[in-house]
Image (cartoon, rainbow, N blue to C red):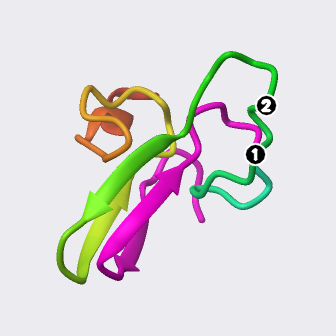
Amino acid sequence: MEPNRPYIIREQAGTTYYCACGKSQNKPYCDGAHKGSGLRPYKVEIEVEKNVAVCSCGLSAKMPFCDGAHKSIV
């Protein structure tokens, strides 16, 4: 994946946990690396199978989803 581009993923219906700390070795998914940091993963309920764009730059106002904020990074 190119830096500062969203992760485009086909997600199945169900509960998904996305990394909020940036330390996961399985980005964009949480692998528990946040433990002890005071942060918690983004818990998302996916109602139907669909494509999602998960933020990788950390600037989105709609975390964990991309809102195009990465385009402002030079």
Residue numbers of the magenta segment: 1-23
What residue lies at 42% left-to-right and 46% top-to-bottom? 43
**Disc 1, disc 2: CB below 8 Å?**
yes
User: Which three-letter amino acid code belongs to the residue tagged 1?
Assistant: Gly
Quarter of image, res 10:
bottom left
Residue 32 got which mark?
Answer: 1
In the figure, 15 relative to 57: above or below? Answer: below
In the figure, 38 relative to 15: above or below? Answer: above
In the figure, 36 relative to 48: above or below? Answer: above
Q: Secondary structure at mark 1?
A: loop
Side of 26 where 43 appears, left or right:
left
What is the residue that sits farthest to the top in this orientation? Answer: 38
> So how many labels did they put on this image?
2
User: Which three-letter amino acid code belongs to the residue tagged 2?
Assistant: Lys
Q: Position of residue 61 (x, y in %)?
A: 26, 26
Q: Secondary structure at mark 2?
A: loop
Calculate the distance from the C-alpha at mark 1 to the C-alpha at mark 2: 6 Å
Q: Nearest the camera: 71 or 37?
A: 37
Q: Nearest the camera: 5 or 66?
A: 66
Q: Specify whether residue 4 is painted magenta.
A: yes
Residue 64 got which mark?
Answer: none
Q: Position of residue 1 (x, y in %)?
A: 60, 65
Instruction: For label 1, count other residues whose C-alpha is less than 10 Å away and answer few (under 14), some (14-19) or many (20+).
Output: some
Residue 35 got which mark?
Answer: 2
Q: Specify whether residue 46 is painted magenta.
A: no
Q: Nearest the camera: 49 or 73?
A: 49
What residue lies at 75% left-to-right and 18% top-to-bottom? 37
Quarter of image, res 73:
top left
Quarter of image, res 47:
bottom left
